[in-house]
Image (cartoon, rainbow, N blue to C red):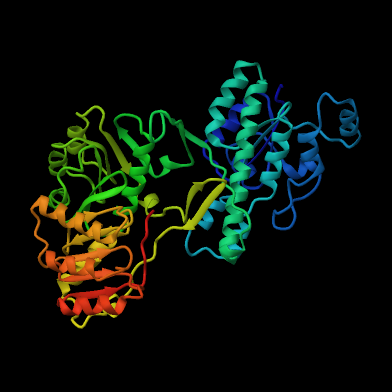
Amino acid sequence: MKINRALISVSDKTGLVPFARRLSEMGIEIVSTGGTAALLRKESIPHLEIEKFTGFPEILSGRVKTLHPKVHGGLLYLRDNPDHQRQAAENQIEPIDLVVVNLYPFESTVARPEVLVDEAIEQLDIGGPSMLRSAAKNYRSVTVVSDPSDYPRLLEEIEKHQGQTTLATRKQLAIRAFLTTARYDQAIADFLRREQSSSTSTTFTLSLPLEMRLRYGENPHQSANLYGHFEDYFQKLHGKELSYNNILDIDAAAGLIGEFPEPTVAILKHTNPCGVGSDPDLREAWIKAFATDKQAPFGGIIICNRPLTESLARAISEIFSEVIIAPEFEPDARALLQKKKNLRLMKMMVSSAQKRDEFAVRSVTGGLLVQQRDSTELQEPERHVVSSRPPTADEMKAMLFGWRVVKHVKSNAIVYASRDRTLGIGAGQMARVDSSRIAIWKANQAGLPLRGSAICSDAFFPFADGLIAASQAGATAAIQPGGSIRDPEIIAAANEHAMAMVFTGIRHFKH
């Protein structure tokens, strides 16, 4: 279909000026609105303002300008339908062949924690989605562009086909437009639902673009794709393509490292922490983390929350890793690590990674489980001491360090920790005492004494045996949610063994 007239109304004006200028040079009449028209006027690009095209002024502070029969009639009438042609002529409706629209920045507006409801409502676009839907519905005759990244492709096609676009291109662009409006509507519904109460929600909808096709899923016989905006959070700088399991591990690693404001290095395997260490010198932080378990990290994931230094790169290059993640890589560090052809280096966009999605979603047979992420923090831990003996300053730091780690270990989870490192980790056992035994065994294997350590449990101790075993291993402090019917027995055992204990009142199950 030959393009004679284009309607351009955009919030994001990236690339607009050269795009619109080229359209005008091709002899395409441009109709425009508001701020878009002002920019075209400033750049001396010929255009017709929307009021002159419709014969009706913008009203209600600009809320009504494109909601007009001459706009939607020009988009929707079927060019090969004689009755539509007659009605269009009778009502002086002229065809609009190209619609270039992107929407008010509602999503970025509501992403601000301090945003007010009225402010968000003002960024709720009505005319834009309406034009996108009208144009996309009539894709057999109308070309619709909802993303500035499509400008070069569209210009190339128009030039290649003497002012026309192909049906295949129009259909693809129409699909993108419908995905845009679907995502936009979902963002609005999610925001308003959060403003009222999540308990009022009776539906849950996801509409995410395909980001990458994966070679396979968890295992080679399973197919898999990645949908959404993962690359807004993580940028691959080097190495093989990401696998399904890599992506799960990267997400788990980002969640864990986000718990630590101090310089920290963490090692993970199959989404479980193998070791975590903190130190102003990242190489020392690595030594602490790696010392926890020197076998499991083989083929694992390494993440740090500071720019990765050359000294750290030299240390971690001594073992085989699948993925290394950092907010930045110093040039010498990156050059050294890139010598390993298959090693994946991932840059973590810190500002994005810190703002993880509010909800966690998992599929189950026949539906989806949707929950808020486990982001609750322990406030004023000193007020939660239940033992006769209060913890020392070092014991409290050890408890809080381990508490941040145990939250990310599969249940049943036990972590032994000192003030700046993990000493032993036990994950995923059916009995909590077995997780404790594994953590003790791991610490012994690593040659790390548990004397003076803190034992951290993701859920309450159902019996005193786990706590007693921890005391016998050398732990002098314990942190756990509490809430067992045997809590008095647990507290008595802690007092009998001169242990300091904190009941957080917060459980961190991770299934």
Residue found 17% across the figure and 61% down from its top = 420
Image label count = 0
Q: Say if 194 sits above or below 67 in the image.
A: below
Residue found 56% across the figure and 21% down from its top = 156
Residue found 16% across the figure and 37% down from its top = 319
Residue 275 in the image, given as x and y percentages of width and height: 20, 51
Q: Say if 149 sits above or below 348 in the image.
A: above
**Could you say which quadrant of the image residue 100 lies in?**
top right
Residue 433 in the image, given as x and y percentages of width and height: 25, 61
Residue 217 in the image, given as x and y percentages of width and height: 41, 34
Residue found 20% across the figure and 68% down from its top = 397
268 sits left or right of 33 in the view:
left
Please name whichever residue, 203 or 169, is drawn nearer the observer in this view of the structure: 203
Q: Say if 152 sits above or below 114 in the image.
A: above
Residue 13 in the image, given as x and y percentages of width and height: 55, 41
Please name whichever residue, 422 or 26, is drawn nearer the observer in this view of the structure: 422
17 sits left or right of 282 in the view:
right
Question: In the image as oriented, which residue stretches furthest toward the bottom?
Answer: 388
**Could you say which quadrant of the image residue 91 lies in?**
top right
13 sits left or right of 360 in the view:
right
177 sits left or right of 304 in the view:
right
Please name whichever residue, 113 or 189, is drawn nearer the observer in this view of the structure: 189
- Residue 280 in sight here: no
Please name whichever residue, 440 or 373, is drawn nearer the observer in this view of the structure: 440
- Residue 163 in sight here: yes
Quarter of the N terminus within the rendering: top right
